[in-house]
Amino acid sequence: MPLTDVAIRNAKPKEKPYKMSDMLGLFLLISPSGSKLWRMKYRFKGAEKKLSLGDYPRVSLRDARKQRDVARDLLAEGKDPSFEKQREKLRGEALAENTFTSIAQEYCNKRRRDGDRAWAPATATRCEYLLSLLDHSIGRMPIHEIEPIDALAAIRKIEKRGKLESARRTLQLASLGRELINGAVEV
């Protein structure tokens, strides 16, 4: 019999963890501490596995069922939902690590040692300085989240300090870096 929100709310902890089953592998695990955790039991390539879907009430019954349905769709495609969840987490972490500052630093380092087309030491130092002007505004932002308006606002802050040439060159450098990231220009 499918779970109801009222039954979930009224579930009390016991001495040992116990399960309240819903449908199609979805269940709620109630621990002795009183926490209520959504889990999904499934089989992938003959092995029994469990997928964590979150805790109640943060994840409602409706949301848990939606996540279960997504996981079942992945199973139908021949994919392991647990592995796909881990992959998505790693993808998110990698994207979050790619901040403007880290990409700008990497770009400058590559240009310093770019063989025949390497920047002169003075040029490299100047470019690193110009890109560092953006650190306070967009430096910690993941590169995929930076919109043109964010870069423009950062450049305008430089202009307000009266550094018009620095603002122009910083915009030029930041734009080139963006094109490199998007694959439009080859280093």
Image: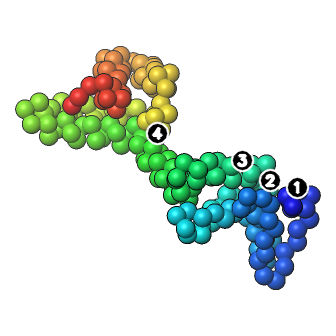
Q: Are marks 2 and 1 in contact (CB under 8 Å)?
A: yes
Q: Quadrant of residue 1?
A: bottom right
Whichever of labels 3 and 2 marks the residue nearer the N terminus, that label is 2
- Closer to the chain start, of discs 4 and 1, is 1
Gap between marks 1 and 3, in whole Å? Answer: 15 Å
Q: Residue at x 73, y 53 (%)?
A: 64
> Which residue is tagged 4?
142
- On the image, the x and y values in percent for residue 172 come to 31, 20
The secondary structure type at the circle numbered 1 is helix
**Cα distance, mark 3 to mark 2?**
9 Å
**Which comes before the other along the chain, label 4 or label 3?**
3
Looking at the picture, does residue 103 appear above or below residue 15? above
Horizontal side of 45 relative to 102 (left or right) equals right
Q: Is residue 73 left or right of residue 146?
A: right
Residue 166 seen from this side: no
Mark 3, other Cα within 10 Å: few <14 / some 14–19 / many ≥20: few
Q: Which residue is mark 1?
A: 5
Q: From mark 2 to mark 4, how far is it between C-alphas?
A: 33 Å
